[in-house]
Amino acid sequence: MHSIIIHHHLYQPPREDPWLEVVPTEPSAAPDHDWNTRINRECYARLAVAEAHLRDRRAATRDPDARAGIARVVNLYAWCSFDVGATLCEWLDAEAPDTMRAMQEGDAASVRRWGHGNAIAAPYHHVILPLASPRERTTEIRWGIRDFRRRFHREPEGMWLPECAADEDTLDAVAKEGIAFTILAPYQVRGHDGSGMPVRWRGASGRTLAIVPYDGSLAGDVAFGGLLRDAPALAQRLMPHRNASDQPADRCTTLATDGETFGHHHKSGDSTLTEALSMVVQQSSSRVTNSASLVVMYPPTSDVQLVSPSAWSCAHGVERWRGNCGCRLDGSKPPAQQWRGPLRAALERLSHHSHEVFEREGRELFQDDPWEVRDRYGDVIALDGEALEQFAKRALRDDASARQVQRARELLELERATMRTFTSCAWFFDEVERIEVRQVLRYAARSIELSGHASRLMPEFVQWLTPATSGAPNAGSASELFVREAMPHRDATVGAAAGAIACAAVGIATARIATFDVTVRPHTALPNAPWHVALVHRRTGAARSFVGHVHGTGPGLTVDLAETEAELGETHCINVHEFPEEIARRLLRPMALSDGALLDVVGPKR
């Protein structure tokens, strides 16, 4: 029997503003609001309702419609193996729940069909596990498993490794957590027979892990060639091979590639894939399945050696994420990625400080070992509000004060922000001044803030980043990018407070702004009295209150804001463009319809 597996690696980095927990406008994603929205429209949502024109050869002789082709809509998540990054899932939960639901329904359908689900787990953040410390590696794996369990209501059997980056310690850590298999490139393992069937890795500890090698040539032609323009050609590449005696042999063709290939990188790629699969399933010698089912049906018996370290997108082990190895997108230019090493060094130095703060303060607050508490945080990390507060209370000593509960939540968020600074795409591309680098630097700034040592650490971190430059004349550095676009120049709470007061002044109800729960009321019953606003951060529980007066309208709208009425006019004067984006939209929308001011103030319309 010839088995066929299609695996989609679905992932987007955390794009949220670390202080507001919402994705800001990304102009490069136009006409959409941001890249998550655009890729969901072009790919993730389409994979749930992939449409193909299928030919029914049995009816073709008697039914003209069959000869012409019948349109059929298919949820490809029910037929294709996939992993979906937890940071993407967080966004899908809030912004595209239908897509998330289609993934869950597709996985459930595959369990009913094959006895094993299409979905496999992934580390929570898209980090290069061989470059992570043992403790960080373990937490990423455990958080990924816990998040998978909560979303798909079952235990994961397999785990996708970001960039397929693997070494001996990584595979051992994955196997230790009860994972049965992973998927790797064929050139990452030595000793397999080329059949594509599962093989076995055995570590020094004695633990084992099944590896399903994907078809590297096929993946390359799908991702970078023209194969997604030709459904019959794709079907032919997926069809069974024959051995020298032309007798059937157990083989498997696994096509593993970025899920964004189907619809985002290649328009209508989802339809081409659906048509190709419809041709394949008509062949009696082939069966479409998933990796979990394959590993159970054909337990690996031959041992292989891992090329350690290795990855699917770097020819130099894992150097792409820490050095100027020459791997880049624009091959016409000489390698100039010497910024990668200093960027990682600066972030590692910052992470050591963050972990020291977490461990020192955590030992005084938590009942259990702080690192065990951090691992358990994976059960609720994708939630907010009451769930996070209850988690912190359960983790603390019985006599903990409200301030200690808040600090415990801040410490756990310190770890979350710190771990996000190692998102792999910050090192993947050619230039240091890209949105991917900017985003991890924003999480670095949030980490510094939550550590409680911002006044000292901010300037030190800027110095640590200075060597992270391409070296080209007039080239920018990571330190300049940090100061210009990552380091907070205004407290996000202030902008949210001003936005809430402005909304109240014009009669717009706002119970929540970004990640803040808000309550707004007149400060007194007197005419022209200032407004009072109270805000609670849903992730940390930090509470603050302000009073403010509203002046002007439209793009000239401002709010005088202070913590007490006596300070009004002496502290903050907040313009509408400093409000959280969605609030600015709501306030400016009527005028925007007439003169386009909205676009000038807050970017492309969502």
Image (spheres, rainbow, N blue to C red):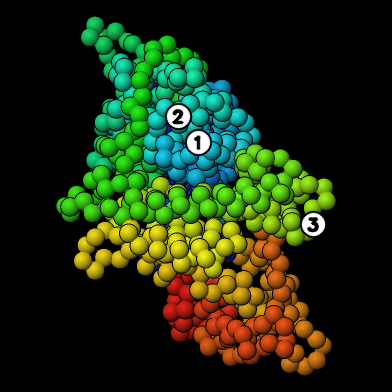
Q: Mark 2 points at which residue?
A: 169
Which structural element holds mark 3? loop
Say the numbered circle drawn on residue 401.
3
**Residue at the extreme bottom:** 527
- Graded by Cα atoms within 10 Å as few (under 14), some (14 to 19) or many (20 or more), the crowding at tag 1 reads few
The residue under the point 24% across, 40% down is 225
- Graded by Cα atoms within 10 Å as few (under 14), some (14 to 19) or many (20 or more), the crowding at tag 3 reads few
Which structural element holds mark 1? helix
Q: In this view, does 44 lie to the left or right of 394?
A: left
Precedes in sequence: disc 3 or disc 1? 1
Precedes in sequence: disc 3 or disc 2? 2
Q: Name the residue under label 1.
A: 134
Q: Distance from label 3 to label 1 (Cα)?
A: 33 Å
Residue flagged by tag 2: what amino acid is it? Asp
> Residue 10 or 394: which is nearer the viewer?
394
Which structural element holds mark 2? helix
- Cβ–Cβ below 8 Å for labels 3 and 1? no
* Quarter of image, res 385: bottom right
x, y percent for residue 603: 44, 73
> Residue 120 or 123: which is nearer the viewer?
123
Q: In this view, does 457 lie to the left or right of 368?
A: left
Residue 372 in sight here? yes
x, y percent for residue 132: 46, 40
Q: Is residue 95 above or below residue 458?
A: above
The residue under the point 51% across, 85% down is 555
The residue under the point 34% across, 46% down is 322
- Graded by Cα atoms within 10 Å as few (under 14), some (14 to 19) or many (20 or more), the crowding at tag 2 reads some
Q: Distance from label 2 to label 1 (Cα)?
A: 8 Å
- Cβ–Cβ below 8 Å for labels 2 and 1? yes
x, y percent for residue 146: 61, 37
